[in-house]
Image: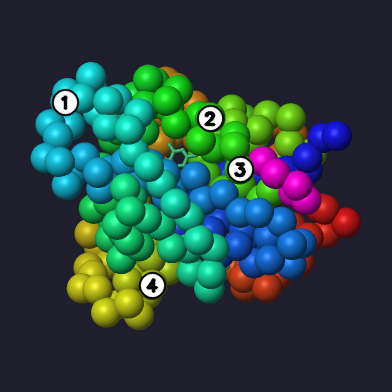
Amino acid sequence: MTIPVLTIDGPSGAGKGTVSRLVAKKLGWHYLDSGSIYRSLAIALLQQSVDLNDEEEIVKVAQNIVLEFECADELIVKLNGENITAQLGLESTGTVASVVAALPEVRRVLLQKQKDFRQLPGLVADGRDMGTVVFPDAQNKVYLTASAVQRATRRYKQLKEKGIDANLSLITDEIEERDRRDMERETAPLVMASDALYIDSSDMSITAVIEEVLGLIH
Ligand SMILES: Nc1ncnc2c1ncn2[C@@H]1O[C@H](COP(=O)(O)OP(=O)(O)OP(=O)(O)O)[C@@H](O)[C@H]1O
Ligand SMILES: Nc1ccn([C@@H]2O[C@H](COP(=O)(O)O)[C@@H](O)[C@H]2O)c(=O)n1
């Protein structure tokens, strides 16, 4: 039996995580936030002061990380037994994640961890290469985007709400730099799958996006 998968790919701050989590809840499906795997690796590398130019050492750390996910109101992630949820959303974590995510061997090592999430009754998977590389046979695919200004503003508000100091112009620069790195890397770049539904959420509410995505499933 083929286990159904809905993939939601797109750039940072497009709303993939928010939409995926709520759609998964509505459908009663599992949820994979693949970015949190790359972010967890980034945190492990920072904790162990690994040189980000030392590819061999980065791959070793990727091979050995033990991750636990708990899908409550927010996603709780434990790295080697330690709750790292608070550090996960920092823009600095995302930047390191995108640097190491460009390494082909890192992606190869982390591939199976992502595929393992495909379990009954179904999976909603969000990331950059869910519909193109990890689950190319997914029955439903979405490419969710929004303008860089909207995405940076959303991220700024999100950080402020969490009480984290943030600078809008710096966040805009970081998001644009991360987009460029994710789209231009050679292995599994962020591209829209040819069979994906394109949604630009710049002027859409979260509810409107969810309705459009659920319409695809039904
Ligand atoms: N359509 C929307 N309208 C307004 N705010 C939104 C919309 N979609 C998402 N947001 C808000 O934008 C912020 C970023 O959303 P989210 O974390 O889901 O993005 P993402 O695409 O998963 O980003 P990343 O890839 O960096 O994890 C959140 O605070 C979320 O509530
Ligand atoms: N499928 C994926 C998911 C993420 N990445 C990289 O991780 C960075 C952080 O991801 P977020 O979704 O949590 O923002 C992202 O910028 C990518 O570089 C990836 O390569 N593939």
| Place of residue 81 in the rendered image (x, y in percent of width and height, measured from the top left) | 33, 53
Residue 135 image position (x, y, % from top left):
65, 33
Instruction: Name the amino acid type tagged 4.
Output: Gln
Magenta segment: does it hold 119? Answer: yes
* Quarter assignment of residue 196: top right
Amino acid residing under circle 3: Phe
Q: Residues within 10 Å of mark 1 (few under 14, many from 20)?
A: few
Q: Secondary structure at mark 4?
A: helix
Looking at the image, residue 194 sits to the left or right of residue 21; the answer is right
Locate the N terminus and report the quarter of the image it occupies: top right
Residue 186 appears in the figure? yes
Residue, disc 4: 158
Could you tell me which secondary element the residue under label 2 belongs to? helix
Mark 2 or mark 4: name the one nearer the start of the chain: 2
For the residue pair 194 and 74, the one nearer the viewer reads as 74
Frontmost residue, 121 versus 164: 121
Q: Residue at x 32, y 71 (%)?
A: 159
Q: Check contact, mark 2 vs mark 3: CB within 8 A.
A: no
Label 4 environment density (alpha carbons within 10 Å; few <14, some 14–19, many ≥20): some
**Residues under labels 3 and 1: Cα distance?**
30 Å
Residue wearing tag 1: 53
Residue underneath mark 2: 112
Label 4 beta carbon within 8 A of ligand 1? yes
Which segment did they paint magenta? 118-122
Contact, mark 4 vs mark 3 (Cβ under 8 Å): no
Q: Residue at x 78, y 51 (%)?
A: 121
